[in-house]
Image (cartoon, grey):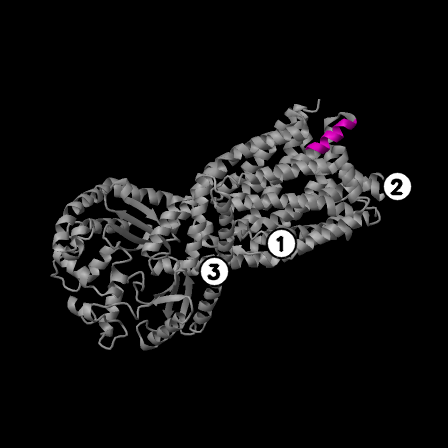
């Protein structure tokens, strides 16, 4: 069977290279035609766990109290903030923003309610709400009130009164959430039980509809943000403005990724061409690998467009990794072909290509297979972008392997052999020196690797999943500067919400009392809630529990990580300032709640308390720029204090918001990826046994791979580079790269040892042959990807530098440690 497949492969590729290239051209053209559907997705959904219960709760709270997906514009005028010129410019800015189609409202200091400018009574406040724009407003008093207001200070205006904020709220897209809920409902049912054929068809249809609609929403959001920036640009002569908010961060992240793919993609391409020119000196060996890499990337982009599979911040590097893998395959094929041609100058092109394929197809196949195993470690994650990245790399590696072993031989068959002398180049000298050094200093080499391993393990113990959004961007970027300004002057950047429910026994008691009262009230034709007021039915909104609410508010407000804290306590403090002698008994609270104008309720009550008064929402903004921010520790500390010190039941306390969802994602990353590395190595060990057919060799070969991964993770630990959605993939990348070198080296040294059964002679010949290909690939990719260090997106910088470091340590481990272990243990007999 194997021989039949091999002969068929030779007849198709080598005997009919033009037909092969024509078939490839048709396939490539078909896939590339779908590349227009390729899209990037950096929405907040890509930062959370797919089946996180906290995500469902977050969306429920968001639907009840309002979304945190709004834009934040900071405004620092050249002159006085409360001067006429600044107010006029601010008014014009807000009016332009309100005209945007999807903008629901724009909140500014010009239109927030005032109660002390001049002082008004509760009755007057109920009848007429005064704002800074009202004719009767006292501007001097208004300035002091806004700056000192518990509701506006450090949220709408800075403490120094020089910077204000505009909050741009977008309309809630009901179609988006309808499709999302429908899709998620079917997915949840699929996890619990088997779907019927009609339900599977419905799930497929609604998933496609949601993906397409989501893409249009993201494009609309991108256009909206661009429009907001254009409006802001019209006012930059009068004030310093920065844009902030989760939607802006998501949109700008996509722009950074696009820019990196475009700008640095071209830069890496040019750099790789130059390096290949230096290495091979022949046009065919420059164009062919770069053409293959380009086609592989274009085919994968087209495939993703065909299946409507969006690329996220995490998976955006798949093209770069496909470039590495494809280039590695091509370099190994080219080097082997050149070796054969040098040793057999009179051989025909058919013989050279056939022998190249015969000797390289098995190690290359197992290289691709084991690399796929490394990336499948990402599939066990609960995070959809990480899962997608694992699957994308699995498909991409398969595509690169098939393309390399079809395009390369077919193209070379159409070329005439062209001899190239390369035995005395600098690469051979370098790999030869390495072989001689490890032979002379074998004990020292082993001790050095032992020391490095110990240091790496210590570094791994210092790894952390704590990181900050702000660390993803360089200091000169608008995102970074905006976050710093909002943190320092406007009460913090990252939203977090503490939701407190009434105790369970309250609802049980309430149901019993309602049952008893309903019969009596039916006879009187009365409604209990309407007659008695909210204070009799609400657990929290009454004179007995509001002091307890204040205690919770005060605790959250004094946390060093928290900036602005808003709650029903803030609103009551503001309303109480209407009359310092006001007695907040149940009767007064009931009347107050009933008579407050609806627009005031929308501002002061609804965002912080449920309609029945049995659920509280504390809105907290956390300082994202705090270098000591530890999300997990903060969440545990809040929950522990509320339950132990303030006596709340565990089930009463719910903490939600993007901070919680992002933290859940980080913790899941650490558990699912770091803990599965051991399983991946076991799987790779099994594949080594199949590939090498030698248990002892397989056990030796796994050692340099483990050390290479430990060195990369250890370096991250020592440099305090946190694990996140981007850096967590470095472990899988390192395993894939190290395994590539290991398989090729072991196959070659096995062949060389069979020549004279001399281990050190086999090592030296292997270094002079396969060592070249390993060296070429490593140096080319490492130097090429170092260009990413110039990116404005810190994850791209980490990816480029850590990928290069991964390749270097994999090369060193496989050229220094692996041969030394083979010589010492003698697994070949």
**Residue 457 in sight here:** yes
SS label for mark 3? helix
Q: Report whether 720 appears left or right of 786.
A: left
Segment tinted magenta in the rendering: 746-755
Q: Secondary structure at mark 2?
A: loop
Q: Earlier in the sequence, mark 1 or mark 3?
A: 3
Is 47 part of what is drawn in magenta? Answer: no
Indicate the position of residue 737 as horizontal and vertical percent values. Answer: 62, 40
Q: Which residue is mark 2?
A: 346
Residue 461 horizontal side relative to residue 6, left or right: left
Residue corresponding to mark 3: 217
Quick one: 474 or 617, which is closer to the camera?
617
Give me the C-alpha separation between circle 1 and circle 3.
Answer: 22 Å
Tally of numbered discs: 3
Quadrant of the frame with the C terminus: top right
Label 3 close to label 2 by CB (< 8 Å): no
Report how far apart the C-alphas of labels 3 and 2 lie in the structure.
Answer: 63 Å
Point out the image quarter for the N terminus: top right
Looking at the image, residue 424 lies above or below residue 795: above
The residue carrying mark 1 is: 302
State the residue at coordinates (45%, 50%): 183
The first of marks 3 and 2 along the sequence is 3
Query: Secondary structure of the magenta portion, mostly?
Result: helix
Q: Residues within 10 Å of mark 2 (few under 14, many from 20)?
A: few
Residue 748: in magenta span = yes
Residue positioned most to the front: 523
Crowding at dot 1, Cα within 10 Å, few <14 / some 14-19 / many 20+, comes out as many
Coordinates of residue 203 in the picture (x, y in percent): 49, 48
Q: Residue at x 53, y 43 (%)?
A: 729
């Amino acid at each position: 069977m194997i021989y039949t497949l091999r002969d068929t492969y030779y007849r198709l590729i080598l005997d009919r290279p033009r037909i092969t290239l024509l078939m490839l051209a048709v396939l490539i053209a078909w896939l590339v035609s779908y590349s227009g559907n390729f899209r990037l997705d950096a929405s907040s959904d890509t930062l959370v766990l797919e089946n996180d219960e906290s995500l469902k709760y977050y969306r429920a709270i968001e639907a009840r109290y309002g979304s945190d997906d709004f834009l934040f514009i900071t405004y620092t005028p050249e002159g006085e903030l409360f001067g006429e010129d600044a107010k006029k410019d601010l008014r014009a800015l807000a009016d332009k923003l309100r005209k945007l189609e999807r903008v629901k409202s724009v909140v500014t200091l010009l239109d927030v309610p005032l109660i002390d400018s001049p002082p008004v009574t509760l009755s007057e406040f109920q009848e007429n709400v005064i704002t800074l724009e009202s004719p009767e407003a006292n501007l001097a008093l208004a300035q002091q009130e806004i700056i000192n207001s518990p509701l506006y200070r450090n949220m709408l205006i800075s403490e120094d009164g020089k910077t204000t904020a505009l909050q741009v709220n977008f309309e809630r897209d009901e179609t988006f959430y309808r499709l999302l809920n429908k899709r998620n409902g079917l997915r949840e049912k699929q996890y619990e039980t088997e779907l019927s054929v009609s339900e599977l068809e419905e799930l497929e249809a609604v998933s496609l509809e949601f993906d397409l609609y989501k893409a249009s929403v993201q494009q609309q959001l991108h256009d909206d943000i661009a429009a907001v920036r254009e409006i802001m640009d019209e006012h930059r002569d009068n004030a310093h403005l920065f844009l902030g908010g989760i939607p802006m961060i998501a949109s700008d992240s996509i722009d950074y990724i696009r820019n990196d793919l475009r700008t640095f993609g071209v830069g890496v391409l040019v750099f790789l061409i130059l390096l290949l020119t230096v290495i091979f000196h022949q046009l065919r060996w420059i164009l062919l690998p770069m053409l293959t890499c380009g086609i592989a990337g274009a085919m994968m982009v087209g495939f993703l467009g065909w299946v409507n599979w969006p690329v996220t911040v995490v998976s955006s590097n798949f093209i770069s990794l496909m470039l590495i893998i494809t280039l590695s395959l091509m370099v190994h094929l080219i080097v082997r072909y050149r070796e054969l041609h040098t040793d057999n100058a009179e051989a025909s092109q058919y013989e050279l290509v056939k022998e190249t394929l015969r000797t390289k197809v098995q190690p290359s196949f197992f290289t691709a297979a084991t690399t796929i195993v490394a990336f499948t470690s990402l599939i066990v994650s609960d995070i959809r972008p990480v899962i997608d990245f694992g699957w994308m790399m699995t498909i991409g590696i398969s595509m690169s392997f098939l393309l390399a072993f079809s395009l390369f031989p077919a193209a070379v068959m159409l070329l005439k052999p062209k001899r190239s002398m390369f035995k005395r180049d600098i690469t051979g000298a370098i790999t030869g020196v390495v072989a001689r050094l490890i032979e002379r200093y074998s004990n020292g080499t082993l001790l050095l690797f032992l020391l490095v391993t110990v240091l790496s393990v210590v570094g791994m113990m210092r790894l952390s999943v704590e990181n900050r959004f702000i660390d993803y961007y360089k200091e000169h970027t608008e995102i970074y500067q905006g976050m710093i300004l909002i943190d320092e002057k406007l009460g913090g950047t990252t939203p977090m919400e503490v939701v407190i429910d009434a105790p369970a026994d309250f609802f049980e008691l309430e149901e019993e009392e309602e049952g008893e009262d309903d019969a009596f009230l039916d006879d009187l034709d009365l409604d209990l809630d309407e007659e008695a007021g909210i204070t009799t039915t609400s657990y929290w909104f009454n004179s007995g529990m509001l002091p307890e609410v204040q205690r919770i508010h005060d605790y959250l407000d004094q946390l060093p990580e928290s900036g602005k804290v808003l709650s029903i306590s803030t609103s009551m403090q503001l309303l109480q300032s209407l009359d310092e002698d006001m007695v907040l008994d149940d009767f007064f609270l009931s009347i107050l709640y009933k008579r407050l104008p609806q627009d005031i309720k929308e501002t002061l009550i609804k965002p912080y308390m449920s309609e029945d008064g049995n659920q509280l929402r504390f809105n907290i903004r956390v300082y994202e720029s705090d270098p000591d921010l530890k999300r997990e520790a903060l969440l545990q500390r809040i929950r522990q204090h509320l339950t132990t010190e303030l006596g709340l039941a565990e089930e009463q306390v719910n903490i939600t918001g993007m901070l919680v969802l992002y933290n859940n994602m980080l913790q899941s990353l650490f558990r699912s990826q770091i803990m599965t590395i051991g399983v991946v190595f076991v799987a790779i060990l099994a594949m080594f046994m199949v590939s090498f057919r030698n248990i002892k060799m397989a056990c030796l070969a796994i050692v340099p791979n483990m050390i290479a991964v430990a060195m990369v993770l250890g370096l991250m630990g020592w440099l305090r580079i946190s694990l996140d959605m981007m850096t967590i993939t470095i472990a899988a990348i390192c395993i894939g790269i190290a395994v590539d070198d290991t398989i090729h080296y072991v196959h070659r040294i096995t062949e060389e040892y069979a020549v004279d059964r001399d281990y050190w002679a086999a090592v030296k010949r292997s270094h002079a042959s396969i060592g070249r290909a390993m060296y070429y690939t490593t140096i080319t990719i490492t130097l090429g990807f170092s260009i990413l260090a110039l990116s404005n997106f810190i994850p791209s910088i980490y990816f480029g530098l850590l990928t290069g470091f991964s390749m270097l340590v994999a090369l060193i481990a496989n050229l220094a440690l692996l041969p030394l272990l083979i010589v010492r243990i003698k697994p070949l007999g």
